[in-house]
Image (tube, rainbow, N blue to C red):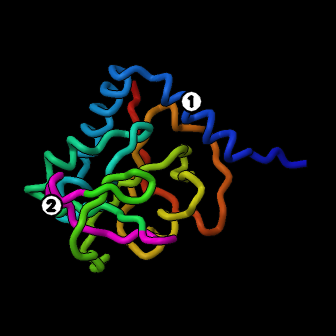
Amino acid sequence: MENKIDKNALRKQVRLAIAAMTAEEKAREEDAIWQQVESSPLFVQANTLLLYWSLNNEVATHALIEKWCKQKTILLPVVNGETLDLKRYEGIQTMTEGAYGILEPTGANWTNYEAIDLNIVPGVVFDKDGHRMGHGKGYYDRLLCHINTPKMGVCYKAQLVEDLPVEPWDQPMDKVIYSKD
């Protein structure tokens, strides 16, 4: 009989591991992650980035977004029912609390998916082959199947496992970035 991974148990285990990290550990890993991302040719050459407004258990993006929003177009997802719409980040003052308590930009929807040069994607768990497991609602998988540009997952070491179960609708990452320290 096949040994099936309990996805919810794995999500819980990883969330507990992240919660156990100190602020200093998170900051050290985040610095290493963003150094790798910012020095990658994909990031350097990108004009339009799809990012995410991070939650406490995700690699923090707020400083990165502020750092680059004047030089690059930053798009953030906005929950709309069962889907994610994209909106341009135009400063913290234009953000409002949306679904799940996440700050989301206001303004017009961005529909020019072809203009997106790089997707930097959160997840709960990643494996070394680029597979990703999110919170279980499928928002990112439904969005990313429409965007044909490189997908870069970012995660803490505690979020990286050897192997994840893969479903036909799962959208793999082209690269997963984590702290190697």
Residue 71 in sight: yes
Name the side, left or right, on which 25 lies relative to 162.
Answer: left
- Identify which amino acid the numbered label 1 is placed on: Leu
Front residue of this view, candidates 6 and 105: 105
Look at the numbered disc 2 and give the secondary structure of its residue.
loop
Q: Which residue is mark 2?
A: 90
Give the CA distance from mark 2 to mark 1.
Answer: 33 Å
Task: Judge whether residue 14 is colored magenta.
Answer: no
Residue at 37% across / 59% down in the picture? 98
Residue at 24% across / 74% down in the picture? 115
In this rendering, the answer to whether 81 lies above or below 133 is below
Task: Judge whether residue 84 is colored magenta.
Answer: yes
In this rendering, the answer to whether 178 lies above or below 132 is above
In this rendering, the answer to whether 64 lies above or below 108 is above
Which image quadrant for residue 155?
A: top left
Residue at 35% across / 68% down in the picture? 149
Front residue of this view, candidates 67 and 98: 98
Q: Which residue is mark 1?
A: 16
